[in-house]
Amino acid sequence: MAKKSAPKPKSKAQADPQAEWIAAFGEPTRLALIGALAKGAQTVTNLARETGAEMVNVSHHLKIMRDAELVTTEKDGRYVIYSLVGATVKGTTLELAHSTGAKVALPLE
């Protein structure tokens, strides 16, 4: 009788995308970026200006958010425009939905 081997642990690249998406909210700069992007698509320069963060820090956080499928990008000449994925503004609440069905509601005030 063949022995069953234990399942291999998931690598970071194979981690649950829903958990990565939720973890992308857990940092103050990223929450500020989400609030800024709730107003509409923006460049890194505009996001840095609006949040008061350094551009290099904004770029770093946007990469984490993009990897978690929280934001999407679009090229406009030499600029990269960032937008929230699955976002709906309802009054003073931002609702975000992930492709797995997970949802988060954040106050905009």
Image (spheres, rainbow, N blue to C red):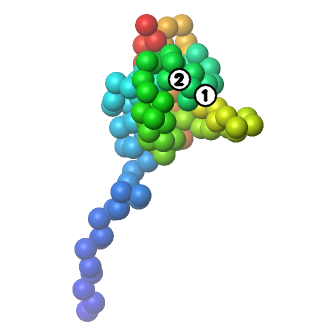
Residue 35, numbered label = none
Graded by Cα atoms within 10 Å as few (under 14), some (14 to 19) or many (20 or more), the crowding at tag 2 reads: many
Q: Position of residue 72 (x, y in %)?
A: 59, 37
The reply to whether discs 2 and 1 touch (Cβ–Cβ < 8 Å) is yes
Viewer-side residue, 5 vs 79: 79
Check disc 2 and report its element: helix, strand or loop. helix
| Residue 21 visible, this angle | yes
Res. 1 image quadrant: bottom left
Q: Position of residue 109 (x, y in %)?
A: 43, 7
**Amino acid found under the numbered disc labelled 2:** Leu
Horizontal side of residue 9 vs 109, given as left or right: left
Check disc 1 and report its element: helix, strand or loop. loop
Residue 47, numbered label = 2
Q: Position of residue 22 (x, y in %)?
A: 38, 36
Viewer-side residue, 42 vs 31: 42
Residue beneath the point at 55% across and 12% down: 90
What residue is disc 1 on? 43
Residue beneath the point at 29% across and 70% down: 7
